[in-house]
Image (spheres, helix red, strand yellow):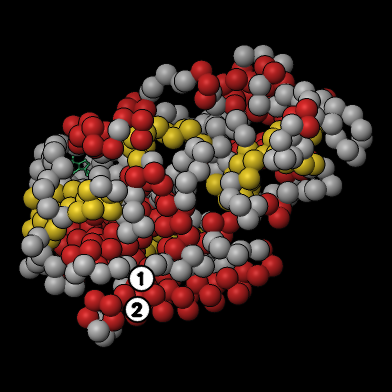
Amino acid sequence: MEVKIIGGGLAGSEAAYQLAKRNQRVTLYEMRPNVWTPAHKTPLLSELVCSNSLKSKELTNAHGLLKEEMRIVGSLVMEAADCTSIPGGKALVVDREAFSRHITAVIEKHPLIEVVREEVERIPDGPCIIATGPLTSDKLAEEIGRMIGQNRLYFFDAISPIVEGDTIDMGYAFFASRYGKGDKDYLNCPLTEEEYDLFYNELIKAKKVEFKDFENTPYFEGCLPIEVMAERGRKTLLFGPLKPVGLIDGKTGKRPYAVVQLRKENSAGTMYNMVGFQTKLTYGEQDRVFRIIPALKNATFLRYGSIHRNTYIKSPELLNRNLSLLGNEHIFFAGQITGVEGYMESASIGFVAAISMLFFLRGKELPPLPEVTCMGALMKHILTPTEKYQPMNINFGLIEGYRKREKERVIGEAISNIKRWIDEVERGLYGTSIR
Ligand SMILES: Cc1cc2nc3c(=O)[nH]c(=O)nc-3n(C[C@H](O)[C@H](O)[C@H](O)COP(=O)(O)OP(=O)(O)OC[C@H]3O[C@@H](n4cnc5c(N)ncnc54)[C@H](O)[C@@H]3O)c2cc1C
């Protein structure tokens, strides 16, 4: 029986290769060049739609560690990146065309993969992997929406920055809930009037990322970028996300002039979300302007805020632990549509989807990915129910048990565990390792 993969991007190409490498026949559907997304420009598989940087290559950075895991498991996307890299300092930068050509050539030459250049409008019968990414075509998005419920399919990200818990200055920040209600769930970062004025003045003149034509959608009033709110007047934020009412700073015994609230992003408290700080500021400007908040002066930003077009599903409510759809166990999702963000993150979930599919076809249970690995941490993100599910790039805060001072141990554990996992996978599939 063949597996159909919809979408020949980073995730779909990785999945096709991993299946075919393990003797599974695949048909890979890619709509380009017959139908274009608003961002892709070539007919190549695995096109990089924007930057040609795949981010850090250093092991001490979670992006670098994810890459090392991908090397260990035998990723095609990683192989292409290593073969086509160009100088880029600490980042793994690739020759974008050579990178996509490398992947296209491997896929198109593989005897067990047939590439069909066609837009898929209906989810096919039989085992399939949906990997159509952030710019899934409208017709297929409608079909997915009908299947999973429109309220579980999103078309836009409006995400706030996330900071690393250990790097927030507790000399300034304090835990409290408004009016003392609740369990002191929020970590509050106070500003004096002078600090607020400085923050406000820098915020309104900071550089923003322009929307692409296809992203020009009116903002929802309840989800305005912080800088757009600020443009409405100096006091708007003081009645919005920076309102201090009901909050007393124990250190001064007074209500601060303004307060930025941070909410835990995970139960371990390694990541905190800046509430109401969705933004179109450039990453550099976020780094500059948000550090004016005294408690965040030396904070590590694990994720910057952004607002952009992005098709993704509410995975934690919809997917089984092997990435298949609850109630339709032959349909798997992979890549950015599952709620990860970024080239390498998407490719890694393409890898996991392919392996999961092989176990499913053999009627076997997928060995769970250790949560101490980057790939396991991304899977945990995809599968953990949260109040508001939002896409996430890899960062150390996602990794189980991470604390900054233990970085060396975290790296060692991730590498040894991913090796153990992939051996377990190969033994589960063949009784022996094919690496
Ligand atoms: C404008 C923009 C800029 C970005 N910039 C960056 C960046 O700088 N760095 C970064 O790491 N990430 C960036 N991303 C995110 C990045 O594109 C994704 O993380 C990554 O490409 C996702 O991989 P994927 O395989 O899930 O989807 P994609 O790589 O997008 O692949 C999906 C494929 O499915 C095809 N397809 C869609 N619908 C159908 C259909 N119905 N039938 C057949 N084929 C279909 C598409 O043509 C596409 O080839 C950006 C995304 C966008 C939209």
Q: Farthest residue to the bottom: give it.
A: 432
Residue shown at the point (71%, 35%) measured from the top left: 182
Split into quadrants, the picture shows ligand 1 in the one at top left
Secondary structure at numbered mark 1: loop
| Left or right of residue 327, residue 195 in this image | right
Q: Amino acid at mark 2?
A: Glu
Q: Quadrant of residue 391?
A: top left
Residue 426 x, y percent position in the rendering = 28, 78
Residue 221 x, y percent position in the rendering = 51, 18
Q: Is residue 5 above or below residue 148?
A: below
Number of marks in the image?
2
**Can residue 159 be seen by looking at this rendering?**
yes
Secondary structure at numbered mark 2: helix
Residue 27 x, y percent position in the rendering = 11, 56
Residue shown at the point (56%, 63%) measured from the top left: 400
Q: Farthest residue to the right: give it.
A: 252
| Left or right of residue 224, residue 292 in this image | right
* Dot 2 or dot 1, earlier in sequence: 1
Is there CB contact under 8 Å for labels 2 and 1?
A: yes
**Can residue 9 be seen by looking at this rendering?**
no
Residue 147 x, y percent position in the rendering = 23, 37
Q: Amino acid at mark 1?
A: Pro
| Distance from mark 2 CB to nearest ligand 1 atom below 8 Å | no
Q: Quadrant of the C terminus?
A: bottom left
Q: Is residue 380 above or below residue 186?
A: below
Q: Nearer the viewer, residue 341 or 250?
A: 250
Residue shown at the point (71%, 55%) measured from the top left: 166
Q: Quadrant of residue 94?
A: bottom left
Q: Which residue was labeled with disc 1? A: 367
Residue shown at the point (51%, 67%) measured from the top left: 372
Q: Which residue was labeled with disc 2? A: 424
